[in-house]
Image (cartoon, rainbow, N blue to C red):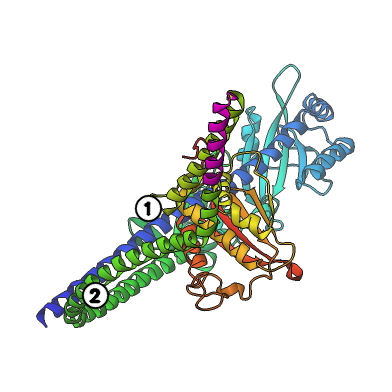
Amino acid sequence: MALRVALLLVWIALTLTASVTAWRISARDGLARVEAQGVSDLRLASDRVVGSLLQFREVAVLAAGHPEVVALARKYRHKDAGTNTRRDAKVSLTLQRLADHAGARDIRLIGTDGTVLAGPPDGPQKVAITRALARAEQGATGFDHRIDPANGQRIFTFATPVFAPQGGVIGIVQLRLNARNVEAEGRGNPVPVWFTDADGVSFLTNRTDLVLLAPQGVTPDPAHYPPGSTTPYEPFTRRELLGRVLVSGEGSLRGPGLEISRHLPVIEMTGHALAVTGSVTRAARLAALSTAAGFLAVGAVLFALWERRRALAEANAALEARVTERTAELRDTNAELHRTQAELVQAGKLSALGQMSAGISHELNQPLMAISSYAENAELLLERGRAQEAGASLTRIAEMAHRMGRIIRNLRAFARQESAPATPVELAAVVDRALEMLETRIERAGVRLIWQRPETAAVVLGGEVRLSQVVLNLLSNALDAMEGRPDPQIEIVIRPADTLICLSITDSGPGIADPSRIFDPFYSTKEVGTAEGIGLGLSISYGLIQGFGGSLRGENLPEGRGARFTIELRAAPDGEDSA
């Protein structure tokens, strides 16, 4: 009992440790991923804003170099002081066309004293020299932003100097741009992005509730922001998570999230983005709960298995004793089965030899009688001095002796035991030997044999003796099936099929009564008690072919035209010849 409690406490501790680790790993990876995405989003938004503003600056520079603008600035420069100056309509139209084409609010040509020489007709006659205009008077491009007190719009201003051909600033081109035109492209961004100036006011943003927010307690420059134009907001609340600071605010900045900043000196602002991390904390909690649930489930399974193992320990001991006893019995039975199988195979051979005995006697008796007759003839011919004719008789005697030797050699090879593994065997030679042993029976039965050896060697993997037994058995069954039928015929075909070689033996007998049972042991359609077999031939043949890694099947031909048995054997690899 104490061991169980100790193991339970250890497992609970492991579960808590694994859950906390899973939470930390998931949160750390999630925060890093969110931060990288926020940095990427802020970079894209910043590049878009800076690029858009720089395009308008180039428009201002282009307008400052326009010949009509330069000519008007020179003309005003050489006028007497105090001369009444009217706004040039032609140059004003040119500047308005440039503004409309670029998407700017307006473009004005201003003298170095602040007098408006060309621009919108409803504009002031003279403007105050702002920081941007003062910078342009010094020969550089000025940039400024402010709230238009007339309508409360946020305005960007570019001031570009107009140079005389001989050098020197003779005027200023002022381009004014509505900030909403710059914000338009970023309003679909799911990440809140805002750009603050030196006073901390969010002058540009992709969220309407973040426009013109000023930090609590900060008074923006009244030259840029008229009183009441900005809205103060509370600073972020901050908390630390895995070495990172998460901030939360109100509205679009409610978070929690990672505040990402990027200084943009080109436009004199700082870009900000809030990468929201709510999904990260949810995923971390889910990872921790999943880990805890997994550990608890595994612990429950292990506890159940441990309890079951205890219950099965005694049963296993008894079972092992019984298994040992049964293994010994099965080993003896298996050995007996192997011996029985070998005896059945050999019995099948001897049965086939018994069926061929009459034909074999005839095959051996005929050459013996012929040898005796030719020997007597040769003796008489030699006595009469007819040596040439006696030599012919002796040649015939040698041919008969060779034939008898070939028959005896085939029978001896067929009768011997063979247990070697599959080796390359020339299939056509096996068929020839089987036909030679059945030659007398085939001739006596008047069977028409259709057999054409293949042009190329058909070498298969098998055993020569066992394969001869199968072919001999199939041919003998075909002869038995056609006994007493008119025009008996056997067709033997060897053909390749991919990596296999097929041997088919077709007879013109009555066909197979029950094709599904032909390979069952002791199944036979022959009369019980006859000397023609006990139904083991096809069963033994089927087992032998399977032992070679091949297959044996039997089928009936259409319209009762006979039966066909097909042997499929693996072709020997290239380079291996038959033994």
Q: Is residue 343 visible?
A: yes
Residue 326 — which label?
A: 2
What is the chief secondary structure element of the magenta stretch?
A: helix
| SS state under label 1 | loop
Please tell me which residue is depicted at 58% across the width and 75% down the height of the picture: 525
Q: Three-letter amino acid code at disc 2?
A: Arg
Does the magenta segment cover residue 385?
yes
Read off the magenta span: 367-386
Badge 1 is on which residue?
419
Where is 96 relative to 191, above or below?
above
Residue, far right: 90
Q: Where is residue 163 in the image (x, y as percent from the top left)?
A: 72, 24
**Is 516 one of the magenta-colored residues?**
no
Q: Specify whether residue 275 is in view.
A: no
Q: In this view of the protein, which residue sits in the foreground, 150 or 258?
A: 258
Whole-percent x, y for residue 423 in the image: 45, 45
Determine whether, in the image, residue 149 is placed left or right of residue 29.
right
User: Residue 527, percent across and down?
Assistant: 55, 77
Task: Rate crowding at label 2 as few (under 14), some (14 to 19) or many (20 or more) other CA atoms within 10 Å.
Answer: few
